[in-house]
Image: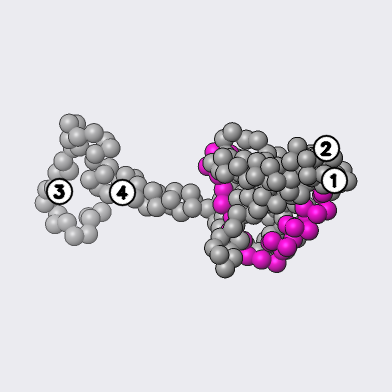
Amino acid sequence: MIDQGVTPGASRPAIAPADPDVPVRGRLAAAGGPLALLPVLFLLLLSLCACGDDGEADEVFATVVRCLDGDTVELSDGRKVRYLGVDTPELKEGDCYAEEAKVFNELLVLNQEVELVGDAFTDDTDQFGRYLRYVYIETPGGPRLVNKELLLKGYAWHFMDSKLELKDELRAAEAQAQASGAGLWCACEEHATDACLVGQ
């Protein structure tokens, strides 16, 4: 059978062999082979890195729909957030000042849009799957750090973690509350400071 487009008897053009001095990788790139897809793969990886572990973007702003206690809230998307660097009395244990801490937390953030900021020096979530965040609210005087407000007013104590980026600021807020006998530092016998006892 005679190939179409080829004159019978005419010699076919010779196919040049691959240059042995050119690596296979180089020949593929020159021919627009797999290496030509590298820019596309790079962009794909960047898009994946911009998402959370579940493939969804981690929102910086969210609305608080429920306060579980003084240091944990639930967001409108169902996520639970645990405030970084602070610990409040346990409601389930009936701890002194637990209810007061929850009420103060509600006054600050319930039904409010908050800004959520992680800490590069600690985990993204705790063992219960709660997101660990610094939580900010907007006020006429500017942003306020809820974690710090709980400490300043004596509704929480500083959760000692030497890795936290804001550990010094939080520690200073706790020391200020202790010095003034604010909140649980005077209301609860097990936490009462010298400042509170002198005042009595």
Amino acid marked by disc 3: Arg
For the residues labelled 2 and 3, the Cα–Cα distance comes to 98 Å
For the residues labelled 1 and 2, the Cα–Cα distance comes to 9 Å
Amino acid marked by disc 2: Glu
Question: What residue would you read off at disc 1?
Answer: 96
**Disc on the earlier residue, 1 or 2:** 1
Query: Where does the magenta region start and end?
Result: 96-122
Q: Residue at (46%, 54%) from the top-left corner?
A: 47
Q: Residue at (70%, 52%) from the top-left corner?
A: 153
> Residue 12: percent from the left, percent from the top?
14, 48
For the residues labelled 3 and 4, the Cα–Cα distance comes to 31 Å
**Disc on the earlier residue, 4 or 2:** 4
Question: What residue would you read off at disc 4?
Answer: 36
> Residue 67: percent from the left, percent from the top?
75, 57
Q: Is residue 72 magenta?
A: no
Q: Is residue 28 visible?
A: yes
Amino acid marked by disc 1: Cys
